[in-house]
Every structure is written in C-alpha cells, then in structure tokens.
Image (cartoon, helix red, strand yellow):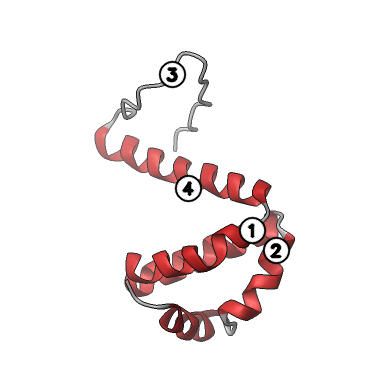
C-alpha cells in the first residue's frame, strides 16, 4: 500500500486538490460529497488500483457523516453485487439472517 503523500500527488494531478483541501467538503456530506468520493475512488483506481484506494479510504471515509458513509457503502455493495451477477449469472449466497431483508439489485 502506498502512502497518503502519493494519494495527494495523484489527487492534485487529477482534481487539483489535496486530501486536506478535500476533507472539509467531505465533512458536509450529501449527494455531491458522495459523488466526489466515488469520483476520487474511480480516478485513483484507474491510476494504480488498490494501492491508492486503500490509503485514500483510510484517510477520509470516517470523516464523512454517518449517513454519507451508509449511502456509499450501499452504492459500493450494489456495484460489487451487480458485477458478480454479470460475471456468474446469479446472486451470491450471502447467508441472509432470518430478519434481514435485502432490496433487489436493479438489472442492467
């Protein structure tokens, strides 16, 4: 895993902002913040995969409001499950507990 200094360099190159400059807007939360977070993740993934994503998430995810963290987790889970469905043609067996309801993932 690379350090946050490398993440900083890539964010400046891609967005013109450092982690410290992004953090205040992430604390606000909301749809624009969540989309910016996903945009940063997508950009960093394209540059160097998990090596940049992991330090980025460690640096900023817990600074997001709880509601934004929940929304982002749901979006990421939807992406992962959609990808699994596309690759295998079925939903993964996740061993749902009796009281747990999971909304269906929209078909592409």
Mark 4 / mark 1, whichever is N-terminal? 1
Mark 1 / mark 3, whichever is N-terminal? 1
Q: CA distance from mark 3 to mark 2?
A: 33 Å
Mark identifier at residue 27: 2
Residue at 52%, 15% (x, y): give it.
Answer: 99
Q: CA distance from mark 1 to mark 2?
A: 5 Å
Mark identifier at residue 64: 1
Q: CA distance from mark 3 to mark 4?
A: 21 Å
> Could you tell me residue 74's position as x and y percent?
53, 42
Foreground of the two, 53 or 45: 53
Q: Quadrant of residue 3?
A: bottom left
Q: CA distance from mark 2 to mark 4?
A: 19 Å
Mark 3 / mark 2, whichever is N-terminal? 2
Q: Which is more foreground, mark 4 or mark 1?
A: 1
Quadrant including the C terminus: top left
Could you say whether the residue bearing mark 2 is in a helix, strand or loop? helix
Count of numbered tags = 4
Q: CA distance from mark 4 to mark 1?
A: 15 Å
In the displayed structure image, the side of residue 87 where residue 47 appears, left or right: right
In the displayed structure image, the side of residue 50 where residue 102 appears, left or right: right
How many residues crowd around disc 1 within 10 Å: few (fewer than 14), some, or many (20 or more)?
many
Residue at numbered disc 3: 97
Would you say the residues marked 1 and 2 are in contact, meaning their CB atoms lie under 8 Å apart? Answer: yes
Q: Which is more foreground, mark 2 or mark 4?
A: 2
Would you say the residues marked 1 and 3 are in contact, meaning their CB atoms lie under 8 Å apart? Answer: no
Q: Quadrant of residue 87?
A: top left
């Amino acid at each position: 895993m690379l350090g946050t200094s490398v993440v900083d360099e890539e964010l400046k190159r891609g967005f013109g902002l450092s982690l410290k400059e992004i953090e205040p807007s992430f604390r606000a939360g909301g749809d624009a913040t969540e989309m910016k977070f996903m945009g940063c993740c997508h950009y960093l993934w394209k540059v160097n995969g998990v090596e940049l994503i992991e330090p980025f998430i460690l640096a900023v995810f817990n600074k997001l409001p709880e509601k934004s963290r929940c929304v982002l987790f749901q979006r990421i889970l939807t992406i992962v499950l959609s990808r699994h469905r596309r690759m295998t043609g079925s939903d993964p067996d996740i061993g749902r507990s009796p009281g747990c309801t999971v909304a269906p993932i929209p078909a592409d």
